[in-house]
Image (tube, helix red, strand yellow):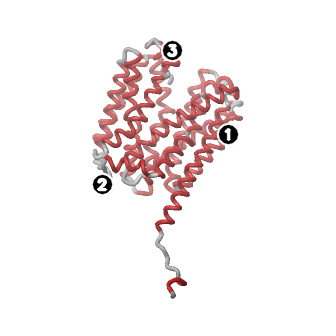
Amino acid sequence: MSLLPALSFDTAVSLPKAGSYISSYALGVVVGSPVIAVLASRWSRRTLLVALLSLIVIGNTASAVAWDYRSLIVARFLSGLPHGAYYGVASLAAAAMVPADRRATAVGYVMLGLAAANLVGVPAATWVGDHYGWRAVFASVAAGGALTAILLSVVTPKLTPIERSSPLEELSALGRPMVWLTLLTASVGFGGMFAVYTYITPTLTQVSGFSQQSVPEVLALWGLGMVAGNLVGGRLADRALVPAIFGMLIWNVVFLSLFTFASANKTASLVVLFLVGNGFALVPALQTRLMNVAGKAQTFASSLNHSAFNISNAVGAALGGIAIAAGYGWASTGAVGAVLALAGIVPMSASLILASRQRGRELPEVSDPDKSGK
């Protein structure tokens, strides 16, 4: 996002049209996650992770050498294809390397990369872009992908797919209501964070009173909150997964609501933004929930989780923009986010009701003493 002005200028398109580069990447995530998960269902997880990283290298190398709007659009779409599948498979691989009672913590370590990106990666990429140009940023990402692929090949144990996993068994996730309800929780419930994040710069500068130069430091504080939430969230999910998910959704309702009012004060906005960042704890918890309800469709369901989060990005940004355009102000994104987090409780509650009914049907029938004559 921070590269858009330069991308717009160098590819000779308007800034709004340059936003299509972001949309193209997101579309790649949504398309690639399920397709790759199904087609590669019989691959060993280590082999699949290395292959996905190789695709990341190819996509970002193509981005670095793109010469016009069309070539960059294609390159960003290609770069997005492995995103969801990579995080889904990486979560499964990490969970397979630890005891069952530490699965969510292991998933949290994987997702720590997403949180750390907001703390270190985004400011670093912005700095590289400002000093060496946007091509150097994409080249750096490609180099990072290549290094990670080498490290995974060397240090990761051989991990095989779930026994008898096949494309049809992976697709069976689509027939599981619990999977859909968990994905809906992610698509709606996490949208609140994106509603605020998308418009955070004008909110900080025009409402909170921060200078444009201090925005990166404030965003780094948000990233620090995400890292802390991610680490704590994994441990809470290991102790009690479903209560942790509900607790995190309620946490987001409370602090996104407070942001609407706290954003008018510098100190209060810093505190609340850190606490809003803690809401990232929902990510490893929902990833673990999907792994628990997916049956044999582990790879497919885990990959779809990142499609769901990209949907939440679009939903949050769109609804936040509608509130601003309606004249409610930049800070109104906090209220929009709170409503989305509250709405996320609905599908999660529905999944619990469904699970309770399924358990009730599975209980053996007990004979009626009166009818049996005993």
Question: Residue, x 28% and y 40% (percent of image)?
Answer: 153
Crowdedness of circle 2 by 10 Å Cα count: few (<14), some, many (20+)? few
Q: CA distance from mark 1 to mark 3?
A: 35 Å
Residue type, numbered disc 1: Ser
The disc label shown at residue 257, or none: 1
Residue drawn at the location 55% of the way across and 34% of the way down? 315
**Residue at mark 2:** 163
Q: Could you say where residue 104 lies in the image, as x and y percent from the top left?
A: 46, 51
Vertical order, 205 against 371 (above or below): above
| Left or right of residue 245: residue 288 | left
- Which circle, 1 or 2, is nearer the viewer? 2
Q: Quadrant of residue 265?
A: top right
- Circle nearer the N terminus (1, 2): 2
The first of marks 2 and 3 along the sequence is: 3
Secondary structure under the numbered disc 1 in the rendered image: helix
Q: Are marks 1 and 3 in contact (CB under 8 Å)?
A: no
How many C-alpha atoms fall within 10 Å of the one at disc 3: few (<14), some, or many (≥20)? Answer: few
Residue at image mark 3: 14
Name the amino acid, label 3: Ser
In percent of width and height, residue 44 lies at 28, 46
Mark 2: secondary structure? loop
Q: Nearer the viewer, residue 328 or 246?
A: 328
Mark 2–mark 3 CB contact (< 8 Å) = no
Q: Label for residue 285? A: none
Which comes sooner in the sequence, label 1 or label 3?
3
